[in-house]
Image (cartoon, rainbow, N blue to C red):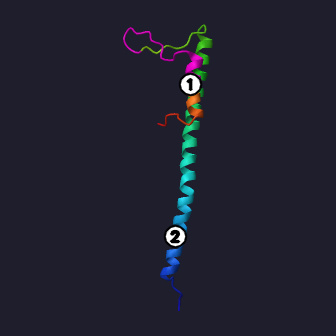
């Protein structure tokens, strides 16, 4: 005769799995947010590198994004201030997640 699982054994296994999931879920959420933050920092770094290379090749001028027809509004703003503000948001954990 084969020994079968009892209802108590099955409930114990299900409860142990539930406890493991409840313990691991918060750490998975934290890991996902850390991954998003590192992607954000990487994107900011790549933009900074692109601006530096562009300015070195173009007489120390930064690229200008024109907001509309005929507009010369520089969206990049002050180079250091904008980058420091963005990096400060990342370090505080308030960087936007896309």
Asked if residue 21 lies in the magenta stretch, the reply is: no
Q: Which range is magenta?
A: 67-84
Expressed as whole percent of the image width and height from the top left, the position of residue 70 reads 38, 8
Q: Which of the 4 quarters of the picture holds residue 34? A: top right
Q: Residue at x 50, y 83 (%)?
A: 6
Q: Furthest-left residue in view?
A: 69
Please tell me how crowded label 1 is: few (under 14), some (14-19), or many (20+) other residues with Cα within 10 Å: few
**Residue closer to the observer: 37 or 58:** 37
Expressed as whole percent of the image width and height from the top left, the position of residue 26 reads 55, 53
From this view, report whether residue 46 is shown above or below residue 36: above
From this view, report whether residue 25 is shown above or below residue 77: below
Q: Are marks 1 and 2 in contact (CB under 8 Å)?
A: no
Decide which of tag 1 and tag 2 comes sooner along the chain: 2
Q: Which mark is residue 85?
A: 1
Q: Furthest-front residue in view?
A: 92
From this view, report whether residue 71 is shown above or below residue 50: above
Asked if residue 78 lies in the magenta stretch, the reply is: yes
Please tell me how crowded label 2 is: few (under 14), some (14-19), or many (20+) other residues with Cα within 10 Å: few
Side of 67 relative to 86 (left or right)? left
Q: Which residue is mark 2?
A: 15
Q: Residue at x 56, y 63 (%)?
A: 20
Expressed as whole percent of the image width and height from the top left, the position of residue 41 reads 58, 32
Q: Which mark is residue 19?
A: none
Side of 73 relative to 83 (left or right)? left
Answer yes or no: is residue 53 visible.
yes
Q: Main secondary structure of the magenta part?
A: loop
Q: CA distance from mark 1 to mark 2?
A: 47 Å
From this view, report whether residue 46 is shown above or below residue 34: above
């Amino acid at each position: 005769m084969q020994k079968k699982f009892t209802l108590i054994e099955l409930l114990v296994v299900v409860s142990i799995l539930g406890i493991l999931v409840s313990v691991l879920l918060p750490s998975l959420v934290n890991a996902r947010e850390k991954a998003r933050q590192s992607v954000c920092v990487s994107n900011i770094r790549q933009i900074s590198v692109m601006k530096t290379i562009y300015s070195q090749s173009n007489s120390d001028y930064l690229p200008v994004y024109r907001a509309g027809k005929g507009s010369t509004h520089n969206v990049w703003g002050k180079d250091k201030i904008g980058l420091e503000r963005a990096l400060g948001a990342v370090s505080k954990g308030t960087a936007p997640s896309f």
